[in-house]
Amino acid sequence: MKKYVSLVTGCSGFIGSHVAKELLSMGHEVIGVDDLSGGFLINNPEGMKFIKGSVADADFIQQLFATYRFDYIYHLAAYAAEGLSHFIRHFNYQNNLVGSINLVNAAVNQGTVKTFVFTSSIAVYGSNQTPMTEALTPMPEDPYGVSKYAVELDLECAHRMFGLNYIIFRPHNVYGEGQNIGDPYRNVIGIFMNQIMQRKPMTIFGDGTQTRAFSYIADVAPIIARSVNVTEAYNQVFNVGADKPYTVNELAIQVARAMGVKPDINYLDARKETLHAYCTHDKAHQYFHSLFSNVSLEVGLGKMARWAKKTGALPGQVFEKVEIEKNMPPSWARMIKREKIAA
């Protein structure tokens, strides 16, 4: 029986490492690529061949595809800080768009890739009606969402022109073990847990009435990994994640409970963001129903909290390549100022 060779980009990151682990359990040979800008070597699953490099480096990608012949590509490498993307526009497009196109070019030229699996984001929807469905026309409102939607459109073009099959997933607010809780710009659950372990109040932008649905990793990674076995899913787009929305206020209370402390919240000035963003997953259930584990928020937070306590708090990682400071949330601007003074 043929052993499939799968490339996983962003393999040392949160979702990527879980997808790589799932592929190994499926019997795939897994080649993992990560530049370690947001991931950790400790996340790399045993049995995966790791190669350090950036998808934004066209020469690196060309050499990678000259060395290996891939059956499947799972492209998860990205810097998914949606709010910060307004202030790091060049970095955002270079990593999230140009890096993706380097992979598409290589996949087409190699000619052996059966399917290109791409993790997009519900950021492509912008402030669309809720719950968001795949039938809606995307209207992204930030550079991160723009870059993700551009890659979606490019994959459609590559399929029409070259026959490259793809599957696009739009996950949202994924959390769980292995997440980078030291990144102060993204992953609100990780931010809350890290603040609690540092004995700081949980910070919320605005009044906390924003609504999101929070998706435990076990309801996302297996579906992404095993999607290539469902040929009917080829060349389609799927929302994937949790159905039930919560306000950020409700989330803070549940995170505090999972961490065994009383809620202590510091409200900051509201930032420009989509206030209500959650999806339906009827289509994903239709194609991948048996792969949903339907972990409740309470159970998922409990699992992540136990992992976070063992891992311990991480120092905040200030983004050093900010390109625009105008209109930046004051708390982020203060972090950058402190970093400059310390340097």
Image (spheres, helix red, strand yellow):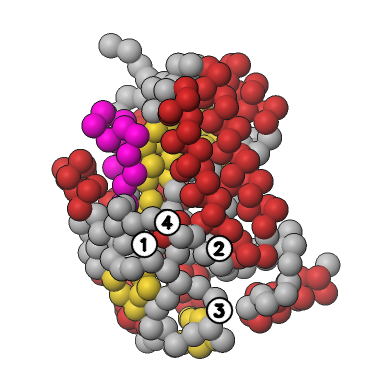
The N terminus sits in image quarter: top left
Between label 2 and label 4, give the one nearer the viewer.
4
Q: Which residues are magenta?
A: 222-241
Q: Position of residue 245 (x, y in %)?
A: 29, 71
Query: Label 1 is placed on what type of residue?
Result: Met
- When asked about the image quadrant of residue 241, the answer is bottom left
Q: Which residue is mark 1?
A: 304
The CA span between labels 3 and 2 is 12 Å
Between label 4 and label 3, give the one nearer the viewer.
4
Badge 4 vs badge 3, beta-carbon distance below 8 Å: no
Confirm whether residue 126 shows in the render: yes
Q: Which residue is mark 4?
A: 138
Q: Secondary structure at mark 4?
A: loop
Q: Residue furthest top?
A: 1
Seen in the picture, residue 62 relative to 316 is either above or below; the reply is above
Q: Which residue is mark 2?
A: 142
Residue occupying image coordinates x 49% and y 49%: 149
Q: Is residue 318 left or right of residue 275?
A: right
The CA span between labels 1 and 3 is 27 Å
Q: Position of residue 31 (x, y in %)?
A: 49, 28
Q: Secondary structure at mark 3?
A: loop
How many residues crowd mark 2 within 10 Å: few (<14), some (14–19), many (20+)?
many
The CA span between labels 2 and 4 is 12 Å
Q: Which residue is mark 3?
A: 271
Badge 1 vs badge 4, beta-carbon distance below 8 Å: no
Q: Earlier in the sequence, mark 1 or mark 3?
A: 3
The CA span between labels 1 and 2 is 29 Å
Q: Position of residue 25 (x, y in %)?
A: 31, 31
Q: Nearer the viewer, residue 236 or 69?
A: 236
Q: Earlier in the sequence, mark 3 or mark 2?
A: 2
Q: Nearer the viewer, residue 197 or 136?
A: 136
